Image (spheres, rainbow, N blue to C red):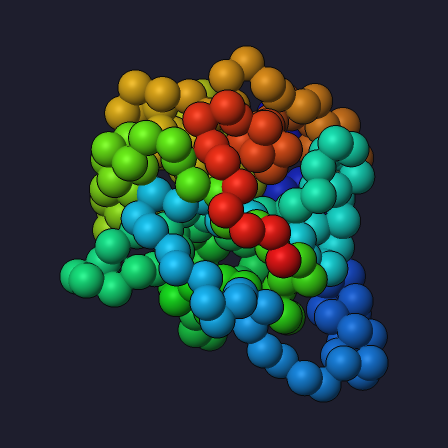
């Protein structure tokens, strides 16, 4: 388990390197738009995947050698509006915001600043989809913090795939089953659920990849 000082060092390093990388990419591409297809009809419980180009995304993709995606969220119905709930670091909604479970419009989740490719997977069981989406919405409303230790046993904080797995497991069905990846880095050693562990679930069908 890492110390608080080591955690701060890790976060500062990621922020600094991520800012540098983002600045380089921005110099080459000034256009910002959503990559979500305009004809995509989302439903509550849909599991949405994206691949980013930042340093954190590259770390995930390096560890997840079978995967095409670095981040995942779940679609929810918030007062009649479809939104994406996801747990993400380093994407503050405002100055001073903390890393936490957040909710945003699907178009924002798939903005080109954070997504180069994406996919929408739908649970084959619509009842399961609805129930899991309700669990995810509750986690957002509870203000659950992001889990920088990537500790699946601590459900008071969550990382992206842990949130999706938790939402479905709470209603009786695991997406990741026993699939896990061991991540060994200078600042982190953990056994984690990675996006491919969710994507490979037999309970999901791919509606669209883009």
Q: Position of residue 92 (x, y in %)?
A: 48, 66
For the view shown, which residue lies furthest in the top direction? 178
The residue under the point 76% across, 49% down is 58
The image quarter in which residue 83 lies: bottom left
Residue 162 at least partly seen: no
Question: Closer to the camera, 148 or 131?
Answer: 131
Question: Closer to the camera, 162 or 82?
Answer: 82
For the view shown, which residue lies furthest in the left direction? 79
Q: Is residue 178 above or below residue 144?
A: above
In-image side of 141 versus 120 (left or right): left
The image quarter in which residue 2 lies: top right
Q: Position of residue 162 (x, y in %)?
A: 47, 33
For the view shown, which residue lies furthest in the bottom direction? 30
The residue under the point 24% across, 33% down is 127
Q: Position of residue 37 (x, y in %)?
A: 53, 67
Question: Closer to the camera, 13 or 103?
Answer: 103
The residue under the point 71% across, 43% down is 68
Q: Position of residue 87 (x, y in %)?
A: 46, 48
């Amino acid at each position: 388990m890492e110390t608080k000082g080591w955690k701060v060092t890790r976060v500062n390093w990621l922020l600094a390197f991520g800012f540098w990388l983002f600045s380089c990419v921005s110099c080459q591409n000034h256009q910002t738009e959503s990559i979500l297809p305009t004809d995509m009809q989302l439903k509550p419980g849909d599991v949405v995947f994206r691949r980013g180009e930042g340093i954190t995304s590259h770390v995930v993709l390096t560890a997840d050698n079978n995967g095409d995606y670095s981040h995942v969220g779940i679609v929810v119905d918030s007062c009649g509006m479809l939104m994406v709930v996801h747990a993400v670091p380093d994407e503050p909604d405002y100055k001073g915001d903390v890393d936490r479970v957040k909710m945003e419009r699907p178009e924002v989740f798939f903005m080109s600043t954070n997504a180069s490719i994406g996919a929408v997977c739908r649970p084959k069981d619509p009842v399961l989809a609805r129930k899991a989406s309700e669990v995810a919405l509750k986690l957002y409303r509870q203000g659950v913090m992001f889990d920088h230790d990537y500790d699946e046993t601590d459900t008071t904080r969550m990382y992206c795939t842990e949130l999706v797995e938790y939402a479905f497991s709470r209603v009786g069905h695991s997406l990741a089953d026993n699939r896990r990846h061991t991540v060994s880095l200078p600042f982190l050693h953990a056994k984690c659920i990675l996006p491919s562990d969710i994507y490979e679930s037999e309970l999901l069908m791919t509606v669209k990849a883009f």
